[in-house]
Amino acid sequence: MFDSVIIGAGVAGCVAARDLAEFLHRVISQKGKNIMLVGPADASIAKISDVYRKVIYMKAPEYATLVACKDLVERKIKNNSAFSNVSVQFDFNPTSGF
């Protein structure tokens, strides 16, 4: 399992998290992989000084599937100007997962 923490100022972080989750849903449905996706949801500390934190959890039986999804997300972020003011962090095997 891994989670992605999306951090962005103002509403940009919330919109980026929603867009990223929609992108992942499309990828998962197209590839027909056995991946569970939860989120975006507020992180345990959701907002500090007008900086919002959202989290998306992904769970798959194979580690390689999660790495492939992470690589797709990284490509999307790099090639999309909507993510220029947003930080995305990946945590494989998070301790605060579900």
Image (spheres, rainbow, N blue to C red):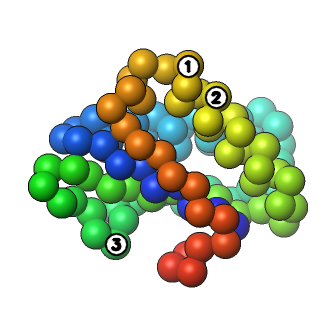
- Do the numbered discs 2 and 3 sit on residues whose CB atoms are within 8 Å? no
Task: Indicate which disc, 1 or 3, sits on the residue closer to the N terminus.
Answer: 3
What's the amino acid at mark 3? Ser
Q: Residues within 10 Å of mark 2 (few under 14, many from 20)?
A: few
Q: Amino acid at mark 2?
A: Arg
Q: Is residue 8 left or right of residue 56?
A: left
User: Residue 73, image x and y in percent?
Assistant: 62, 37
| Residue drawn at (77%, 62%) of the image | 60
Element under label 3?
strand
Query: Which label was assigned to residue 79?
Result: 1
Q: Is residue 20 left or right of residue 33?
A: left
Indicate the position of residue 96 as horizontal and vertical percent values: 51, 79
Q: Is residue 64 left or right of residue 69?
A: right
| Residue 13 image position (x, y, % from top left) | 32, 42
Position above or below: 83 against 68 = above
- Identify the residue at image location x=84%, y=66%: 61
User: Residue 1 occupies which quadrant of the picture?
Assistant: bottom right
User: Which residue corresponds to mark 3?
Assistant: 44
**Residue 57 location, quadrant:** bottom right
Going from N to C along the chain, the mark reached first, 2 or 3, is 3
Q: Which residue is mark 2?
A: 75
Q: Nearer the viewer, residue 60 or 64?
A: 64
Q: Are marks 1 and 2 in contact (CB under 8 Å)?
A: yes
- C-alpha gap between disc 1 and disc 2: 6 Å
Callout 1 secondary element: loop
Residue 60, which numbered label? none
Mark nearer the viewer, 1 or 3: 1
Real-space Cα separation, disc 1 to disc 3, in angstroms: 29 Å
